[in-house]
Amino acid sequence: MATTTQAKYHHLIPRTYMSAWANQSGTLKVEFLNNPGVLEPRNKDNIAGFTDYHSIKAGMPICTQSDTDIIFSVLTDYNVIIDGQIVTDTRKMNESFYDFDNWIITRKNGTLARKKTLKDEIQKVKIKDIEANWSVKYENKWGETVSEIENIILNTTKPEIPSFSKDYLMKFFVALDWRGFQSNKQFEEAYKRITQGFLDQVIIPEDERELPFLETIADEFRHDLLLKYYRLFLEDNGIIYEYAETCLKKTGFHFFVADGPTYFDTCDSPSFVFTRPDRAFQGIMPITPRILLSQGKCTDDSNVYQVTHISNQAVEKYNRIIQSHATEFVIHPNN
C-alpha cells in the first residue's frame, strides 16, 4: 500500500489527458467561467486539482483496518486511553480521532507522552493507493492510447472500423465521469437529496476539515463517498466498476472528427452523459481537439466503432454542450 508523509497535488483531470490541449511547454488556454471571453495561460501541472485530494488520512470514515494500522502505528509502544478505556484497536482510535486532545497517552512505564508530537506524526501519514493505482492502471496508458486513436481514426476513410482498446476506453471514460469537478450525474443528484437542508448547513471548523475547501458536513460526506467508490473501482469492484462493465455490454463508441477551422474544447468535467433534445442519453468525452468520443447504444455489431467527420456547426454545438458542463473553467485548443 502506497503511503507518504509529503503533501502532493492530485489532479482530478489527469495531466496526460490535458496534454492534447497544451502547447510544447505544457501551457493551456483556459477560460474561467467567472471571467468569460478571456483566455488565460495555465500550465497543466498546476490546474484541475487539489493538494492531497485522493489521500486517505486519520479520522476519515472510509479508513479500513489496514489503513488505520498504518496511520496509528506510531502509537504501538504506547498505552492509549479513550473515555476511560484502554484502546488497542486502531479503527476505534480512528473513530475517536476528532477527540484526540482528550485522549490519555502514556509510555509503557506510565509517564505521559507528548501528544502534540504524536498527533503531528499521525497527521503526516497519507495513504496514497488511489493515486498509485490510478497511475498504474489508467493514467500511464492514456498517452499511448491517444496516439493509437489518432493514428487509426485520422487515417481511415471508412465509416466503421474494428473496435480496439474498448475495455480500457470504457473504464477510462466512466472513471473520468466520476473524477471530474462535477461527478457522475446520478451520484450528484443522490448526494444533494441526502444532504440538502441540513448537512449542507453545518459548517466544519477550519482546523478540523479534511481539506480546506470542504466547508460543510455535506462537502465532506461527498468527498469521502467519492473516495470510497473510486478506491473500490481501482480494485475492480464497487458501483463504478459494475457500471463500466454494464456499459461494455450495452453501449458502444462513435468517434467524431473535426476537420477545422473550429476544434473541440474540453473542461474541468470532460466526461459526462447528457440528455439530447430527442430525450436519448449520450455520453461524450473530447479525446483531442480534433477527436470527440461519443457513447451510445451498441450498433448491431458491438465489435465496431463508427467514425464520422462532422461540420463546423456540429463542432460548435458540441462545444456549447461541453462548456455548459464546466464547473470552473473551459480549456480551448492551442491551434
Image (cartoon, grey):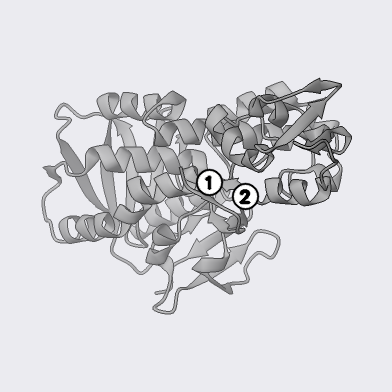
Q: In the image shown, does 168 or 90 lie closer to the viewer?
A: 90
Q: Amino acid at mark 1?
A: Gly
Which numbered disc, 2 or 1, marks the residue closer to the eye? Answer: 1
Q: Position of residue 30 (x, y in %)?
A: 56, 67
Q: Amino acid at mark 2?
A: Thr
Can residue 279 be seen at all in this image of the molecule? no
Task: Identify which residue is drawn at 40% across, 58% down.
Answer: 17
**In the picture provided, is 99 more to the left or to the right than 229?**
right
Q: Quadrant of residue 61?
A: top right
Q: Position of residue 331 (x, y in %)?
A: 51, 63
Task: Identify which residue is drawn at 86% across, 22% down.
Answer: 83
Residue of label 2:
327
Q: Position of residue 130 (x, y in %)?
A: 48, 43
**In the picture provided, is 206 more to the left or to the right than 232?**
right
Query: In 3D space, how far apart are the residues under numbered discs 2 and 1 (Cα atoms)?
Result: 9 Å
Q: In the image shown, does 186 or 101 lie closer to the viewer?
A: 101
Above or below, 223 against 141 in this view is: above
Task: Identify which residue is drawn at 65% across, 38% down.
Answer: 72
Say which mark, if any, is on residue 26: none
Please identify the residue farthest to the front as the structure is shown.
Answer: 109
Above or below, 182 against 312 in this view is: above
Q: In the image shown, does 164 or 256 lie closer to the viewer?
A: 164
Residue of label 1:
180
Q: Earlier in the sequence, mark 2 or mark 1?
A: 1
Disc 2 is placed on an element classified as loop
Above or below, 48 against 196 in this view is: below
Disc 1 is placed on an element classified as loop
Please identify the residue farthest to the bottom as the structure is shown.
Answer: 25
Q: In the image shown, does 195 or 40 lie closer to the viewer?
A: 195
